Image (cartoon, rainbow, N blue to C red):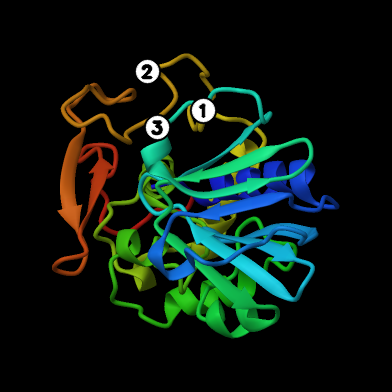
Amino acid sequence: MPEGDTVWRTAQALGAALVGSTLIRSDFRVPELAEVNLTGERVTASESRGKHLLLHLGHQRILHTHLKMEGAWHLYRPENRWQRPASQARVVLQSPRWLAVGFSLGIVEMWPSGAEFQKLAYLGPDLLGANWDLEKATSRLRANPERPIAEALIDQRNLAGLGNLYRAELLFVSGINPTTPVDKIVHLDRLINRAKSMLESNKERAVQVTTGNLRPGYRHWVYDRAGQPCRRCKKPIVAEPMGEPGRERTIFWCPTCQSQFVAQSY
C-alpha cells in the first residue's frame, strides 16, 4: 500500500500539471460516477490528507481518491502511450497539455467542497501536513495505552500517512519489539518525530530509503526481507501477521535487535 510520502508526491505532481488548467475531457470508469462530466471545470488545488488525495474543482466539487493497495496516478502527454493497461484505468482527466490517469484506484468519489472537513475528521495529525501537531498525535496514541505499538502506529486515527513499510523500519531503527504496549514506550514523542523524519526525507524521491543506501536490495532494514539476514546481527528477519482478525498486516522485524519488550531511551 502506498505510504503518505507517495500520496504527498502524487498530489504535488497532479497540482503542478493540472492546477490552473481547465479540463477538456473527463472519463470516469466506475459505475457510481459513470455519467459525471468535468469538461470545462477548472482545477484549483491538489492536496493530500494522509493517504487521501483531494483534487479541488472550480464548481465547488472535490474529486476524492485513495490509492489503497495498488492504485497510482500517472501523468502523460496526450500523444504518449500509457504504462499500465487501459482496463486498469478508473479516472481519466485531460487538460490542454496533460492527461492524468488514475489506475486501480481503491476509492473514487465526488464530494461537495467543504465536505472533506467532516469526512476526514477522524484522521490523526498528518505527518506531512502543514498543520502537523506532535502533541495531538502523541495524545491519540496514548489514548489506548495497552495497544501494541505496531498496531497503533498504522491506525490512521492516530497518525495520518504512516503505513506498513515505515512502521517496520521505524521500530527496527528504534530497537522496539512490535508487541510493546504504547504506554511502555519511554520516549513516544521521539518515535513519532522519527516517523515524520522518515517520510520527510523520502517525499521528494520515487524510491523509499531508510538505510541511506539507494541501491536496489539495500534500501530497507527489515521490510519485505523475511528470512534474509538482519543487516546488523545477521539473524533471519521474521514476518508475522499482526492486527485485528480480518485486518491483519504483516510486520517485519528482527527478534534479536528488537528483543527488548520495553523500549530503551534512544
Q: Of 216 and 144, which appears nearest the observer?
A: 216
State the CA–CA distance, disc 3 to disc 2: 27 Å
Q: Is residue 173 left or right of residue 237?
A: right
Whichever of callouts 2 and 1 sits on the residue coming sooner in the sequence is 1
Labels 3 & 2 near each other (Cβ < 8 A): no
Q: Which residue is mark 3?
A: 85
Q: Is residue 188 left or right of residue 146?
A: right
| Residue 217 numbered tag | 2
State the CA–CA distance, disc 2 to disc 1: 27 Å
In the rendering, at what x and y percent does residue 223 appear? 33, 36
Q: Is residue 167 left or right of residue 127?
A: left
Q: 10 Å neighbourhood of mark 1: few (<14), some, or many (≥20)?
A: some
Labels 3 & 1 near each other (Cβ < 8 A): yes
Q: 10 Å neighbourhood of mark 3: few (<14), some, or many (≥20)?
A: few
Dot 2: element = loop
Q: Which residue is mark 1?
A: 82
Residue at the image point whose x is 45% and y is 73% from the top: 141
Question: Relative to 182, is 199 above or below?
Answer: above
